[in-house]
Image: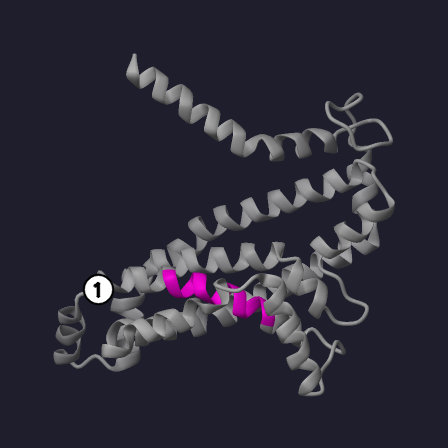
Amino acid sequence: MRSRVLAAYCILIYLFLAAPIIIVVGASFNAGNFLTFPPQGLSLRWYVVFFHNDVFMRAIRTSLWVAAVTTCVSLVVGTMAALFYVQHAGRWKETVRVAMLAPLLLPEVLTAIALLFFVYAIGIGTRSMFGMVVGHVLMTLPFVFINVAASLESFDPDWDMAARSLGAGRWTRFRRIMLPLIKPGVIGGALFAFIISFDMFTISFLLKGIGTSTLPIQLFDYLRTNFTPEAAAVSTLSVLLTLGVVIVSDKVLGLKLHRF
């Protein structure tokens, strides 16, 4: 009896968490002209409209490009920071940890405003997407650092010493011993960085380049003047893209890391 109650409780929690996604996906198949739920008939018309909307297509490409660049930069910097934190920080470990997690302590809007002042002070302004990428890296870096550092805590230094005694160089030891062992943290950090960057709104809104918009910004602008199921179709595709990145990264990237 107790196990059944616990199972029912867990199901209710999962339904509560999934309810917004279910409603949005259901509304995207609405045959009517307005965004309502339950849908007034089933139709794919708004997906057709969406895929023929050049503005949304361009916004998706921009979001994917920014998220990919952000993930690469955050992964490299975050992994290096985690290596220093675990192996070399010594008595400065707590200081390094607080410094790496500092971007999460401030409200995102304050970080965005500070970065906006910074990019204008150095003469870049909003002429390019440099400021937006910097902002995305700043917000995703702590997640990479946390995941990689957690994996490194279980790494035994004796393994590295044994490889060194056999003549393996520093890069060989990292590539063939350490990297496969910290693979879960690296993949987890990359997934967090990509998903957070792809869905980030506040920093993108204040730091976007002139004439460019990411998908969350374009969707926000669209909903200010339109309330059609096309917005739900856009959101559904965003969910599917995020889910696809998780699945592909777990299957493909995981296999590649095993081949070191």
Amino acid type, callout 1: Phe
Q: Secondary structure at mark 1?
A: loop
Of 25 and 103, the residue lying toward us: 103
Is residue 5 found left or right of 39 in the rendered image?
Answer: left
Question: Residue 167: image x %, image y %?
Answer: 17, 81
Q: Residue 126, relative to residue 200: is it above or below?
A: below
- Residue drawn at x 30%, y 18% as measured from the top left: 3
Q: Which residue is mark 1?
A: 155
The verdict on residue 147 being magenta is no
Residue 88 visible: no
Q: Provide residue 136's location: percent of width, then percent of height.
A: 58, 66
Horizontal and vertical percent position of residue 5: 36, 17
Q: What segment carries the magenta color? A: 135-146
Q: Residue at x 68, y 75 (%)?
A: 116
Q: Is residue 218 visible to us here?
A: yes
For the C terminus, which image quadrant?
Answer: bottom left
Looking at the image, residue 257 lies above or below residue 225: below
Location of residue 1 (image quadrant): top left
**Residue 136 in magenta stretch:** yes
Residue drawn at (54%, 69%), measured in percent from left and top? 137
Left or right, 202 with respect to 145, comes to right
Q: Nearer the viewer, residue 59 or 91?
A: 91
**Dominant SS in magenta:** helix
